[in-house]
């Protein structure tokens, strides 16, 4: 074992930061052995030094940036946010020749390639296993494991809050708003849930998976994002009837020479591994082309799982040389060429809220026919003359563009209430 | 990129070896970029140099040991076998300061700690991701990912042949022997299937997972092994009725200060991820203690998946320093203390073939009562006075030792035909 200890400074002592300190303290000897040198916590930064965290604050400072100037070998950034103090801290630490470990998906999704270049220029590493899918070693698996054959696609359930809400909606039959409120009360959802339920958090994580899978620079801007707020208990019940479940997926896939990245609710077959990722768990399916399909699941958030990913990164920073941040030199990362997957075909689930009046169905059918959308099956349950009722249709294999065209025309009708819902039915 | 190429020699050009050569040839530029230096195949050894493999044999030699003496930086051992030429080649290569990559589970399970010491003494690395679960990066995940908290248990479906046979038996209702024969005809099972269906291959792989999960030396000898040849279509049908599936599991878990390693058919709940690993796929569930449970699945064999794992190891050997083979210095690996899990309780499935005569059930019930085994439910379908019929029982939570004691007494009865079958029902 090297006689030189590896000095660790941690900025941000919330749930994850506290978990990292506790794990280092509980398993320090074994982790040091794995790292090949003693791991020593030498500095921490947190807003409130008086708060009882159950451990002593070694080398506390109010100013996180001080950690970038100190004698630490690695700075662990757990403050969060894509700009401001987190970005400054990571930038300064790398410039000062310190390794950086972070769980900050927003920062990496937005500034990942520029920070990777900075790390490589200064001969240090920048690690972020905890930034996507919590404790699941999926970034490592994409960066170092599934590299022999070109990856075709990655599909992931990457947001535990959305998955918890969709699972609860299925179990209880209650609507989105009620389940969200309960999730907030239980601490499973933030007071402002927009980033989670709107799909933005999934997009951050997807940008990182994309980069590692395809050797491209993280490209948040080309991700088409749709959240789950419009999903109704009826949609979930119909999905079940057809043998599917509704999940919020982040999907990145090769189409021709480009990459299509989307975040959207999708129907996945009940027997598929992704359909069986329930509650707050995360799951990722990697289609590694000729090498086959691989599935990973586990806790995607929470103190111990996320801290576990941070710890693995710290040990690797301590033991290894400066490996390329995204698996290959940052200068070699290609700019991602966005692809339009709207020509790719799938069966689609569509739901319309319409006035129960003669002629409405004929009107919808006409719009569908004009857009070239052909219907495999249709369900209208119940009658309520003059009142809104739901019509559900499943299309034959149809391009997204055609479905969108039809829905736009249908939505314009005064017989159609609220925005029509369309959800692709995944083959996998 | 380093100007010095990384020279690769491959011994054994069967399915996997051929796949490695083809992948290096097809994706050499990208893989070299990941490795940080040019990957160059400089030598191969295979029995028949004339065989058409679809690629040229660069630097062919009839004697694999020559590769250990040549100028290669890494020797890739794909010959197989726990002794003989494979062991000699790996030993010589390490002694000559060459990295070694191998898919040889038997060699590592038997001689892993001694070879790890040799590698570390010579400042090189010994990698074997392909030795367990094919393309699934599970060894990497255990060695480098799930390290922050002590692992509690690893459960795996590690043999594709057994899983294929059990899956086919469930789908078709046909008996073991018929499905095995068909699997042999299709090339899914070896002419001599003993190592697969007897559980030995699973044991080799389990020994490696155990070592990485618990920081112990691989210990093949303390694994209790039971295969699948005695499983009947009735067992599978009953399992289904109870909401379970039968899988051949390798299980390694902490019990007190020791580790229990077993290979045995187990009933797993239909909704559990392991139950949904079908056909020739592999699946591994890691109970990472406080860090939660993680599940991995994918192809566990075949040219491209296995070659993919070998390639990842080659790239890592080329780019990295000599990391500890089992995640920590070989000298620090503990001797595994075998634990006896027979006191741990589970519900058990039991099947007896008995003569349909008055008093037989009373006799069985008496033996069970004497051993302290209490029965939750019993099924006897059909009547055939004087002929053998099957009686199936599910116990309440019972220690394995008690079930074994009861079955030994019951098996001694002349009313009981063939060996009674006992299968634990896993909680997971």
Image (cartoon, coloured by chain):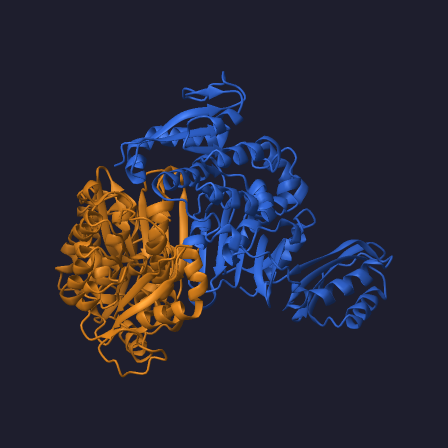
Chain colours: A orange, B blue
Taking the image as shown, residue A302 lies to the left or right of residue A48, namely right
Q: Quadrant of residue A170?
A: bottom left
Image vertical order of residue A287 relative to residue A128, above or below: above
Image vertical order of residue B39 relative to residue A396, above or below: above
Residue at point 25% right, 43% down?
A215
Residue at point 26% right, 53% down?
A208
The N terminus of chain A sits in image quarter: bottom left
Residue at point 76% right, 58% down?
B352
Please count the marks in the image.
0
Residue closest to the far top: B50
Where is residue A83 shown, x and y percent of the image?
A: 14, 63
Where is residue A144 shown, x and y percent of the image?
A: 35, 46
Residue closest to the far front: A3
Taking the image as shown, residue A174 lies to the left or right of residue A229, namely right
Give the camera-side residue of B339 and A340: B339
Give the camera-side residue of A271 and A399: A271
Residue B395 can be seen in this image:
no
Give the camera-side residue of B412 and A72: A72
Where is residue A180 shown, x and y percent of the image?
A: 28, 74
Taking the image as shown, residue A347 lies to the left or right of residue B420, namely left
Where is residue B158 shown, x and y percent of the image?
A: 54, 48
Give the camera-side residue of B343 and A173: B343
Residue A190 can be seen in this image:
yes
Q: Quadrant of residue A194?
A: bottom left
């Amino acid at each position: 074992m090297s006689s030189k200890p590896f000095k660790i400074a941690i900025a941000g002592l919330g749930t994850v930061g506290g978990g990292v300190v506790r794990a280092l303290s509980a398993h320090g000897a074994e982790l040091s052995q794995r790292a090949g040198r003693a791991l020593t916590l030498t500095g921490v930064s947190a807003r409130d030094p008086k708060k009882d965290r159950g451990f002593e604050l070694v080398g506390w400072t109010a100013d996180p940036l001080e950690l970038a100037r100190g004698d630490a070998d690695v700075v662990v950034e757990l403050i969060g946010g894509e700009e401001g103090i987190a970005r400054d801290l990571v930038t300064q630490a790398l410039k000062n020749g310190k390794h950086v470990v972070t769980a900050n998906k927003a920062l990496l999704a937005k500034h990942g390639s520029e920070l990777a270049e900075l790390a490589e220029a200064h001969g240090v590493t920048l690690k972020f296993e905890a930034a996507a899918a919590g404790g699941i070693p999926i970034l490592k698996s994409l960066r170092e494991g599934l590299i022999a054959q070109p990856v075709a696609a990655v599909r992931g359930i990457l947001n535990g809050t959305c998955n918890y809400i969709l699972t609860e909606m299925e179990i209880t039959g209650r609507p989105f708003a009620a389940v969200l409120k309960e999730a907030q009360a239980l601490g499973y959802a933030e007071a402002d849930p927009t980033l989670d339920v709107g799909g933005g958090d999934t997009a951050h994580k997807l940008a990182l998976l994309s980069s590692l899978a395809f050797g491209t620079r993280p490209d948040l801007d080309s991700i088409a994002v749709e959240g789950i707020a419009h999903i109704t208990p009826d949609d979930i019940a119909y999905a079940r009837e057809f043998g599917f479940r509704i999940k919020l997926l982040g999907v990145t896939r090769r189409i021709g020479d480009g990459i299509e990245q989307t975040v959207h609710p999708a129907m996945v077959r009940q027997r598929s591994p992704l359909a069986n990722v329930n509650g707050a768990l995360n799951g990722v399916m990697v289609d590694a082309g000729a090498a086959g399909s691989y599935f990973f699941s586990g806790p995607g958030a929470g103190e111990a799982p996320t801290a576990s990913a941070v710890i693995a990164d710290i040990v690797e920073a301590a033991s290894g040389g400066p490996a390329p941040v995204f698996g290959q030199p940052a200068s070699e990362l290609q700019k991602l060429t966005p692809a339009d997957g709207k020509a790719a075909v799938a069966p689609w689930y569509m739901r319309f809220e319409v006035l129960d009046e003669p002629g409405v169905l004929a009107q919808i059918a006409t719009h569908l026919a004009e857009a070239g959308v052909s219907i495999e099956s249709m369900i209208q349950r119940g009658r309520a003359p003059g009142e809104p009722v739901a019509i559900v249709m499943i299309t034959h294999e149809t391009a997204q563009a055609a479905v969108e065209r039809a829905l736009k025309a249908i939505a314009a009708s005064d017989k159609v209430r609220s925005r029509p819902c369309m959800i692709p039915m995944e083959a996998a």
